[in-house]
Image (spheres, rainbow, N blue to C red):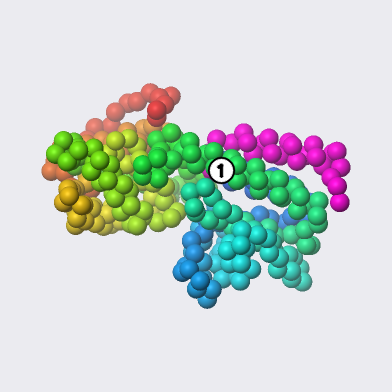
Amino acid sequence: MTSSPCQQCQYSEDILEVTRQDSVCDLRSTIHNLLNKIPSIIDFYGFDVSMAEEGDQNKPLRVEPYGNEDKAIIHLVSTHPMAKKALLTGGLEYQAGDLCTYTFIGVKYPNASQGIWVIKSSTILQPVVLRHLYYLLQAHNNCSQHLTKTNTDPLTGLQNRQSLSKRLDHLLHKKRRETDPATDQAACICMFDIDFFKRVNDDFGHLYGDEVLLLFSGLMKKTFRESDSLFRYGGEEFIVLLNHCTPDLALNVLERFRKAVENYDFPQVGHITVSCGFVPMQVGVPANILVDRADNALYYAKEHGRNRVENYNFLLEQGLVVTQVLNMETELF
């Protein structure tokens, strides 16, 4: 079956829309909206996926939804054999039911991570819809590869400073739409600084300094969840956005990370420590001000002994930091 000129025009318009996106979050949202416009498609779900164990088909997949999907669809994706097969082959698998059909599509990302798209439709997808889906998938893969290169720190593999502003804006916008004011501190911005890192470069050289940064980022990946966003902010400074995390929980998680760094034996260099400042995200507070507050808490930690974690809001309540009046239009970068 060949596509009509009208269909080809729609393909081109949709691909152009995909290529306009300048962040992974916007890319995923665009794919969701475009697929949901196709009449036979009831809904679209996207997931980041970690294979449980190589070759272990009985253990559930670890999945992280793009959005706030319900537990039923998360359970379906994590346990369904067709989902696992699609992930392993990078192909397309069907599961037809009495009321609807699920189509599982394995997605490969340029940084070696994996994903699954799940399409819920009223019937098995027709060839013309599959062709549309194929074009969208190819556009997504190309755009994802480009965004990964431009938004990733080449040394550590973490997201870079340029991508932080977009991610913060996305989270704050999402909180404005979804979060109950009584629980609007369900995410935290955390800023790290490796203590006395200049001494590492001076005493051992920049090659070992780079190795410390690489190993430090590895500890971050092991400590924090896949749903958290990890950034190299610059030099020896890093930022973590803890999602769905209260201040008390954030303090516990950050203390665990601080101790993991303190106890880690870095080759040649030995032991190093890290200081951390964090602030709960609040609706109505601009991203640049939140980052500045996390930085103020970090500065307090550095000035009062290092190797410690400080909560900006607690410091403010104790009168240990002063709230600055900032230009609300100031850019992060």
Quadrant of the image occupied by residue 277: top left
Which residue is pictured at 86% across the width and 47% down the height?
Answer: 2
Q: Quadrant of the C terminus?
A: top left
157 within the magenta span: no
Q: Is residue 219 above or below residue 156?
A: below
Element class at badge 1? helix
Which residue, as the protein is rendered here, is positioned at the far bottom?
58
Q: Is residue 284 above or below residue 68?
A: above
Which residue is pictured at 48% across the width and 49% down the height?
Answer: 111
Which residue is pictured at 76% across the width and 50% down the height?
Answer: 131
Q: Say whether residue 8 is left or right of residue 141.
A: right
What residue is shown with label 1?
A: 144
Q: Say whether residue 325 is left or right of residue 77.
A: left
Q: Main secondary structure of the magenta part?
A: helix
Q: Is residue 138 above or below residue 107?
A: above
Q: Which residues are magenta?
A: 1-25
